[in-house]
Amino acid sequence: MKTILLNQRNERDELLSRRYLLRRTKIDAELLLSSHLIKLITGPRRVGKSTQALLMLKDKNFAYLNFDNQSLLQAWDADVVMRMLDDVYPGYEYILLDEVQNLPAWDLWVSTLYRGGKNLVVTGSNAKMLSSEMATALTGKYVQVEMLPFSLTEYFDWNSFVPSSANDGLQAEASALVDDYLRNGGYPEAVISRQLAGSYLATLFDSIVWKDVAKRHNVRNVTDLNNLAEYLLSNFCNLISANDLTSELGFASVNTTKKFLDYLHEPYLFYYLPRYNHKLKLMKKAPRKVYVVDNGFVAAKAFSLSDKLGRLLENQVFIELLRRGYDPDKSMFYYRLHNDKEVDFVLRRGTQVECLIQVCYDMSSPKTEKRETDALVECGAELNCSNLYVVTNRDERTIDKKGFTIKVVPIMKF
């Protein structure tokens, strides 16, 4: 066991020696670390949770356990590990537990450490397991920080680019970077090496489906699970329902489909946006819109992007809204008017609708402008909301219509 921990210490030190982009985050690392609460950093696999934890702790004396390591899991003995940590990391102040959900009954062990006074930073990549298990054994003992792939602003940071409207050359560079980001996404490894992004993301997508979903849930019919994942990916930003998917894909039952949909959300791979309705029962019955955590997965799985730029933009806006703290089911929805016109995003704070957002890649056509703004204005009237936006690729202006002012903003400024 000591050899395993020494190897992991070397791994930790090597990781700390690399160059990293400081993420734009509201996290106050010193404030977090001074708290006795467990610091839980969650999000999709490979988005930089471990890096964020390492950067928080880099000037501290901390122990490191990486549970994405078969040797550690196979040799696991909690008592021996704690004795060896004292030898390998003398006088440590914190323990970083990386991808801890891979350890059976991890929540009970973490709770024991917490009661023993250990200051813990924990990372994990499974939404349902983390939320349900943290909510039982660890109720009131943790603070959660959620991470996602690079935002567009962070992508600019990585490319050492500062947007400016005063220089045409900079504007052209900004447009090129925005286009690349929309098509290839913001996964850190894919950002660092765009030439390898496609193969890297295709492998990562398959790994999440096969390892984080199929293996964890002992799925016997992995082909059906994989077919559903690829179907959702090719239909991102579209409406889906369990009944339709069951029929379309020839699954055995609607319950199987619902179960697989939940499984694919757990590792933060897909999200499902409900339709806004004052009546909860009707909201639950309506089809949902499906989104994927990163645009790069779409390109990586070899779908043609030529006719999907509008959906890529909409998907990116959805992820940005997640990044800002909006939550499907609680504060973010889509809306369908009685005449079947649709508004992409309804944002709510408490019981108040605070903002309506329509996404349109190119609104230069008068017909397109009318379609998008008519839906916004009618929805604004129905929901008593005057804070209206259209997010576009490049267009920026304001539109006054039927007593409403619509702000048209490019994705770069959104």
Image: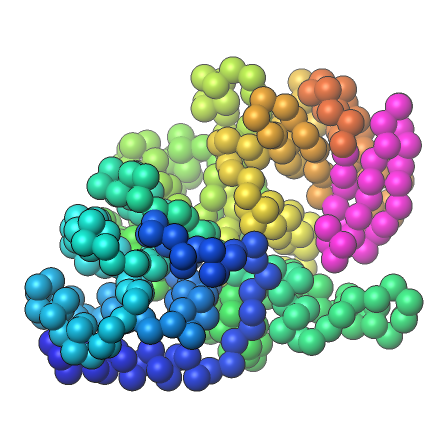
Q: In which quarter of the image is residue 2?
A: bottom left
Tell me: 88 left or right of 405.
left
The secondary structure that dominates the magenta segment is strand
Residue 36 vs residue 302, the one in the foreground: 36
Tell me: 350 left or right of 369.
left
Magenta part of the chain: 388-414
Tell me: 384 left or right of 258.
right
Residue 56 vs residue 393, the one in the foreground: 56
Residue 53 picture location, percent across and down? 41, 65
Residue 120 vs residue 178, the one in the foreground: 120
Instruction: Mark yes or no: residue 88 visible.
Output: yes
Q: Does the magenta stretch include residue 403?
A: yes
Residue under the image location 63 percent in, 23 percent down: 352
Residue under the image location 50 percent in, 22 percent down: 283
The image shows residue 369, relative to residue 381, as above or below, that is below
Residue 376 picture location, percent across and down? 76, 30
Residue under the image location 78 percent in, 27 percent down: 386
Residue 213 picture location, percent across and down? 30, 53
Q: Is residue 329 magenta?
A: no
Tell me: 247 left or right of 396.
left
Instruction: Mark yes or no: residue 268 visible.
Output: no
Residue 158 vs residue 169, the one in the foreground: 158
